[in-house]
Amino acid sequence: MLRSVFGHTLWRHRRSLLGWTLGGLALGWFVVSFYPTVQTSAAEFRQILERLPEPLLETMGIDPATFATAKGYVEAELYNLLGPVLVVVYAVLLGGAAATREEEDGTADLLYALPLSRRSIASQRAAAASVLLTALVAALATTLLVGNPVYGLGLPVAGIVGINVALWGLAACFGALAFAVSSWTGLRGAGAGLAGSLAAASFLLDGFAPIVDWLSWGDRLTPFDWYLRGDPLAHGVGGWQLLLVGLGAALVGVGIVGLERRDLGVTLGLVAFPLRRRRTAEAARRGGESWMLGRIWSWALWRRRRALLWWIVALAAFTTLLLAVYPSLDDLGGDELAGLVAAYPKEILAVFGVTDPESVLEGPGFVSSRIHSSVGLAALLVLGIGFGARAIAGEERLGTLDLLLAQPVGRARVVVEEAAALVAVVTLVVTVGVVVPMLVGGPAVGLGVTAEGMVAGNLGMILLVSLYGTLALAVGAWTGRRGMAIGVATVAAVAAHLVNGFGAFVDWLEPLRPWSPFSWYAGPKNPLSQVLGWQQPALAATGLLLVALAVVGFRRRDVGV
């Protein structure tokens, strides 16, 4: 297993693959298991859907003629949003790591000293990433194959294979893009940021094009449109799905060329900032940036400045597009849509953090259900947990923690400044990516968010993400294991999110709901309808407690350098 680059790559990802595949199995089985509930309310769903405009249904990925059938339900719920988000995120992370992980770890010289060409090494790593991606998609496919007879879905095996090949091709495209960009630049953050931003833009363009005239030009130009074109769940693999696979293969080839031509350990700066890079060098020579590079927290920000730019741009674009779409809701059957939301299985809405379904059609509920409770919050948690895990455990894995500890500062200060950098990063991304677009565009579209709701919702999101980021930092400080830090923080966040969501509808979970940080954050309706009170100090105090625990663990542990 360890005698080839291909085998070593698979072995190195074995623990993370287990977590992702278990998540895929749980997600697929969860969606499939609620089909009988939808089937029981089939007549009610059909009546509501028939009154809704077709463009709105296209945006939601719903075919009114088939939604109450197994095919329509599985396609709308599993393969229009939840499945693509899970698999595309995994593919993007794999693509960036396949290109630059050894350089980040400082082991590239050992890898490229092997009697193998760069092309062979890059090809083996890309092939291993493809196998890992296949394992995750196979987990989703397994839930359909097993659930097919159990719940009487009646889906053709060729269709199950076809939709999952399509999903693999979609994820492979964006994963290969991350691999290509990271291979040419040597920056994993740039590759993952660009690929993730384009994936989000493609998803939004495909979803909102049917109801927003100025987006209609891009309806047929996105990978998300090609992904389901030809109805692969009914007819199996088609030409459009093979196009996605071919595009992914082409991007891998581009990445291999970039890796062959680039000097290892030397990153190519973003073309958009040549003047800035020159000014940076001049300022550094003059000592003008000593304040930025002479402190642990500011140095942590400086190192991640390019990745932060991509996060801010992507989140700001997402927020702006949601604000632009909001006025279209009333013109597209607001009353009927309210009826659809009311009839929807509450357990599925809970997965998206929607505990008060009626609030989704109001301005604060509409925005918060997408930014503060589902897609936006999930992306920020990825950012915060990743930053926290890298702060101590990541430095130790890279072999640079000894340089950090060689500074004339104590371990407690290292932890505190890393935590401060985490909070600063999250605050910057939320402020520029969410708050500024809402302040500018909210009044223009009649969003109706109060000043208190704006402060409480966004401050709460900053504190919640920082809390789980500091949890990752604390686990990393105690164990020195970045993977464990990410795993523990992610499991804790998902569990608390589900307790808050399902606690609103499931009796035996209701007593646990007040203990979930997500409950403190979201309140009884949604985060943007929250009030300023004890909840925000409670989130802040929990985060500070985790920082204190991290200090204790880091002081007591023998550090591997």
Image (tube, grey):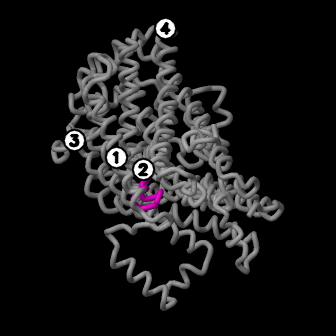
Q: Residue furthest front?
A: 115
Q: Are marks 4 and 1 in contact (CB under 8 Å)?
A: no
Kind of residue at badge 1: Leu
The residue that disc 2 covers is 179
Q: CA distance from mark 1 to mark 3?
A: 17 Å
Image-quadrant location for residue 231: top left
Nearer to the camera, 419 or 345? 419
The image's mark for residue 251 is 1
- Residue at (55% x, 83% y) in the render: 291
Q: Where 549 falls versus 41 (above or below)? A: below
The image's mark for residue 149 is 4
The residue that disc 3 covers is 221
How packed mark 2 is, by other alpha carbons closer than 10 Å (few <14, some 14-19, many 20 or more), is many
Q: CA distance from mark 3 to mark 4?
A: 37 Å
Q: Is residue 184 within the magenta segment? A: yes
Where residue 134 appears, as percent x and y from the top left, is: 48, 31
Say whether disc 3 or disc 2 marks the residue closer to the N-terminus: 2
Q: Are marks 3 and 2 in contact (CB under 8 Å)?
A: no
Where residue 168 appears, as percent x and y from the top left, is: 40, 32
Left or right of 33: which side holds 18? right
- Residue at (54% x, 56% y) in the render: 112
Q: CA distance from mark 4 to mark 1?
A: 39 Å
Kind of residue at badge 4: Pro
Nearer to the camera, 342 or 205? 205
- Give the foreground label among 4 and 2: 2
Q: Are marks 1 and 2 in contact (CB under 8 Å)?
A: yes
Q: Is residue 97 within the magenta segment? A: no
Residues shaded magenta: 182-192
Determine whether the residue tagged by mark 1 lies in a helix, strand or loop: helix
Image quadrant holding the N terminus, namely top right
Q: CA distance from mark 3 to mark 2?
A: 22 Å
Q: Main secondary structure of the magenta part?
A: helix
